[in-house]
Every structure is written in structure tokens, then in C-alpha cells.
Amino acid sequence: MKKMNVLAALVVATVVSAPVFAADMGMGVFTSPYAGATINFQTIEADEGGDDVNPMAITLVGGAFVHQYVALEARLGFGIVDDSIDVGGTDVDIINDINYGIYARGVYTVDNFMPYILLGFTSAEVTADAGAFGEDSETNSSLSFGLGLDYKFMDNLAANLEYAQLVNGDDFDLSAISLGVKYLF
């Protein structure tokens, strides 16, 4: 729990200080903060083998540009749809209860398109529920990486498509293909 509180404090401090840091460096126009949401089509792979599951989640995104080519962002995601696998004749429902992280995005803008690479840190909790046989939750954290594309279709709105390997942990790996929208302040 202490680890979660420290990470939460770092996420808040980064998002709040990013525009101030950029303004001090005279970057003015690139300090645009943004907020949005994505729907995540996830894949969870158990490290001891077995079938992959494909639950869904919603992630809230907030960030700001600290340089023309760099944005810092924080994310908080919640599972909305579980997926089931058959384990010895018992259906086991698996969901990514919560994930959160902090990331840097290396971006390049071409007209209304902004391709980017993503590098950061994610922590995720996955729960397996076997009904009458009980449930078990595991939390893993690791470095994260991905590729994405923002498309600005209005002055203050952008659509987003991304693939990210969020967690490569001891108990499970978590990746996601995400579709979303961002509001640019």
C-alpha cells in the first residue's frame, strides 16, 4: 500500500508540475495540457502458460507537453468487462481491476497527425474469480512501452489509437490496444 501511495504522489506531482516546468523554459505554446479517456482491449497472459484472456477496461488520461517533442502523462484504468477461461471444468472470470502509471511520450507532429512512442511505468491488479472456489488477486508492476497515433480532428479534440505492453510481471503480462479521445486545453 505504501508503494501505491508513493506512486500516486509522483503521478500527481508530475502532471501538476509539467506545465510550470515547460513555461519556465520558455516553451509557451507546447505546454498544452490534455485530458481524455480510452477503451482498452486487453490481453492478459499468465506466466505459467495457459490460455490468454481478453478483458476490457476504461482508462482516464491526463498530461501536458513539457517540450515540443515530449509530453508527460498519468493514467488510471478500471476493468469493465471480464473474460472467462475453463480451468478443470470450472469457469474462471479474469479482469484487470485497476491499473495506473506514469509515462513520457516522444511525439512528432505532421499536420493533424501526431505519432508517438511511449515509455513509462505501470502497476496493475488482476483478479481471477472461480465462483464457489473463491478468488485470487495479483499485483505486478514493470516498465511499459508502446506506440500510438493521435489525430486532431477539431481544434480541441483528438482521436487516439495505441498499442502498449503495460506490464511484464512475475505472475502475468498485460498488453492493450486502445481507442480514445483527448480534449486539448
Image (tube, helix red, strand yellow):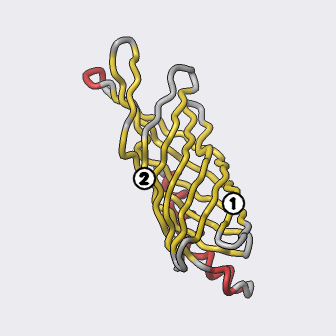
- Could you say where residue 82 lies in the image, as x and y percent from the top left? 37, 37
Q: Is residue 41 above or below residue 138?
A: below
**Residue nearest the observer in this picture, 174 or 117:** 117
- Which one is earlier in the sequence, the residue at label 1 or at label 2? 2
Marks 1,2: beta carbons within 8 A: no
Tag shown at residue 161: none
Q: CA distance from mark 1 to mark 2?
A: 21 Å
Q: Is residue 158 above or below residue 31?
A: above
Check disc 2 and report its element: helix, strand or loop.
Answer: strand
Q: Which residue is mark 2?
A: 58
Q: Residue at x 69, y 60 (%)?
A: 116
Amino acid type of the residue tagged 1 in the rendering: Tyr
Closest to the observer: 16 or 184? 184
Residue located beneath label 1 in the image: 116
Q: Write down the quadrant of residue 73 in the picture.
A: bottom right
Q: Amino acid at mark 2?
A: Ile
- The residue at the far top in this view is 88
